[in-house]
Amino acid sequence: MELDDKLEQFKNIITNSNNIVFFGGAGVSTESGIPDFRSKDGLYNQKYKYPPETILSHTFFVGNTEEFYKFYRDKMNATKFEPNITHLKLAELEKQGKLKAIVTQNIDGLHQKAGSKVVYELHGSIYRNYCTKCKKFYGPEIIFDEKTGDVPICPECSGIIKPDVVLYEEGLDDETVSGAINAIANADTLIVAGTSLTVYPASGLIRYFKGKNLVLINRDATQYDSMATLVIHESLGKVFEII
Ligand SMILES: [Zn+2]
């Protein structure tokens, strides 16, 4: 099928759906300029002695907190990035009542910045941070404001502050996962985009979908392409600008 026909089919699916769920990976944010640290041209940088998967692990956070924050402040500060056309169109679809939820693997908060309300952030968010001692929550300033020193410390109890993001070795939040499953299980259309579906738990979650249209939008082929109603290998922005 030609790309134009696929885009037309995509438009028709959106028009005829009333319970859309969008499942997005790193590819949704790369068009905002945020690098995917898992891709080979991503944010891995010779400057660091360890690969990002090591630094962004629970063990590393506990044992090398200062080094963790050096990397985290340098590479994970997405607060200055802006939503792209995909984020904005999805927020619009939610306002129209067509889209019921976004499930995302991204931690950059760009869906909320675009105006989306129901967002299941499987891997947490850089916008939420909590004291490991008294559990008080803080915004991103406490991490990214340089005046806070090397390791951010709770002003109330002097506990170490940890970003509310899921590090390697850590489990996902139960409520977030069950919310995502529930949304996917009730959807009539599931759009999976910007993910190769190899990262846990993406592949497991889409198995709950029993609706009509499974749409995959990704630059490269995935193992789920044969299951899909519609597969578009194109940049997300090019697809979403037509709706
Ligand atoms: Zn505290």
Image (spheres, rainbow, N blue to C red):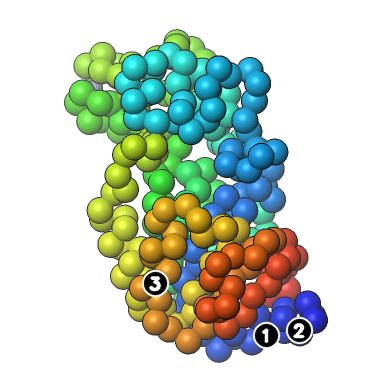
Ligand 1 lies in quarter: top left
Q: Quadrant of the C terminus?
A: bottom right
Q: Quadrant of the N terminus?
A: bottom right
Q: In this figure, which residue is indicated by the disc labeled 2?
A: 1
Q: Residue at x 40, y 56 (%)?
A: 201
Q: Residue at x 27, y 26 (%)?
A: 131
- Amino acid residing under circle 1: Gln
In terms of secondary structure, where does tag 3 sit?
Answer: helix
Specify which label sits upstream in the sequence, 1 or 2: 2
In terms of secondary structure, where does tag 2 sit?
Answer: loop
Is residue 79 visible from the viewing direction of this image? Answer: yes
- Amino acid residing under circle 2: Met
Residues tagged 1 and 2 counted as in contact (Cβ below 8 A): yes
Q: CA distance from mark 1 to mark 3?
A: 23 Å
Q: Is residue 10 above or below residue 235?
A: below
Image coords of residue 57 (percent x, y) = 40, 31
Q: Which label is found at residue 207?
A: 3
Residue 25 shown left or right of residue 7 in the figure: left
Specify which label sits upstream in the sequence, 2 or 3: 2
Specify which label sits upstream in the sequence, 1 or 3: 1
Q: Which label is found at residue 9?
A: 1
Q: Which label is found at residue 21?
A: none
